[in-house]
Amino acid sequence: MSVADKSKEKRGEAYETVKIVVQALVLALIVRTFLFQPFSIPSGSMKDTLLIGDYLFVSKFSYGYSRYSFPFGLAPISGRIMGSEPERGDVAVFKLPKDNSTDYIKRIIGLPGDRIQMIDGVLYINDEAVKRERIDDYIESSDYGVRRVARYRETLPNGVSYDTLDLTEQGMLDNTRVYEVPEGHFFAMGDNRDNSQDSRVLSAVGYVPFENLVGRAEILFFSVEPNDSGWKVWEKLGHIRWERLFRTL
C-alpha cells in the first residue's frame, strides 16, 4: 500500500470515528431532552425517600414539554406542549420559580384550586386532615451523635402513601396560613418536613407554575454515602448503598 493510500485510509478511519462520536452525542441529547434525564440529590429535604448521594432518572415526557425541558431553557416554547398535569403525590423535579434555573425536587401535594395548611405538624388539604400513622423512628448518625426522628406514613386523598419525617410538631413550618393554590400552579413539599424549604415558604419557593415542571422522578439507579474518596472509585465501592439501587419512586 502506498503512502497516499495509507493516508487516505487513516482519514477515512478518523472520519468514521468522528461520525460515531457525533451520532452518540446527538442520541444522548435526544434521550436527555425528550425521554430521561439523570439528577443527583444534594440535600436531605426529601429524607428518607431520597438521600444525599442518590442518583435518579426523571421522565421528561410525563408532564409534556416546556422551554425548561431543554438545555438552558433555550427552546422557543410558550407554556407546555403535550402537557399532562402531575398527580397528587408525584415526586417531581421543577425549576425554582424565583430564578427559573435552579432544580428542585419535592413531592406534589396541592393541585390547582386546593387549600393547603399545616396545623401542629399535620397536613390539611381542603380543610380535611390527611391520614397520618406513626410507624417508627428514623435513626441517623452524625458528628454530634445519634438522633431519632419520628417517622409517619402519610396517605393522600387519592391513596398515594409515603413516609415523612417530623423532628418536632412545633417547627417553623408546622403551623401555617391557608395556602390557596392558583390555577396553573402546584404546591410542593419535602418529605423531611422540618428541614425542607418548599412551597410553604412563599418568599423562597412558593407555588410552582405548570411550565416550570421538568419531569417525574422514576427510579434510583445509583446511591452512595457522602465520603471523601474523591475520584477513587475503588474506595467509593465501600460506600455504595446497594439496597437502594433500582428502587422505584
Image: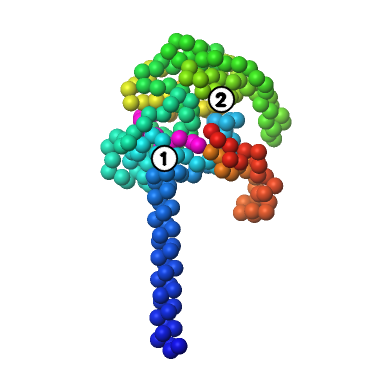
* Residue 7 % position (x, y): 42, 82
Residue 239 among magenta residues: no
Res. 150 image quadrant: top right
Task: Evaluate whether residue 167 shows in this view.
Answer: no
Task: Evaluate whether residue 219 shows in this view.
Answer: yes
Instruction: Find numbered disc 1 in the image and state the secondary structure of the residue it sits on.
Output: loop
Residue at (66% x, 42% y) in the render: 242
Mark 1 and mark 2: span between their CA atoms? 23 Å
* Residue 27 % position (x, y): 41, 54
- Going by the image, does 73 lie left or right of 120? left
Q: Residue flagged by tag 1: what amino acid is it?
A: Lys
Q: Which residues are magenta?
A: 208-218
Name the residue beneath numbered marker 2.
162
Residue at (28% x, 40% y) in the render: 77
Res. 138 image quadrant: top right
Residue at (71% x, 29% y) in the render: 146
Q: Is residue 135 above or below residue 65?
A: above
Taking the view exactly as shown, the residue that stands out farthest to the top is 127
Q: Main secondary structure of the magenta part?
A: strand
Residues 1 and 29: in front is 1
Residue 212 among magenta residues: yes
Name the residue beneath numbered marker 1.
60
Residue at (40% x, 86% y) in the render: 4
Instruction: Find numbered disc 2 in the image and state the secondary structure of the residue it sits on.
Output: strand
Residues 58 and 82: in front is 82
- Going by the image, does 94 lie left or right of 155? left
Q: Residue flagged by tag 2: what amino acid is it?
A: Tyr
Residues 10 and 184: in front is 10
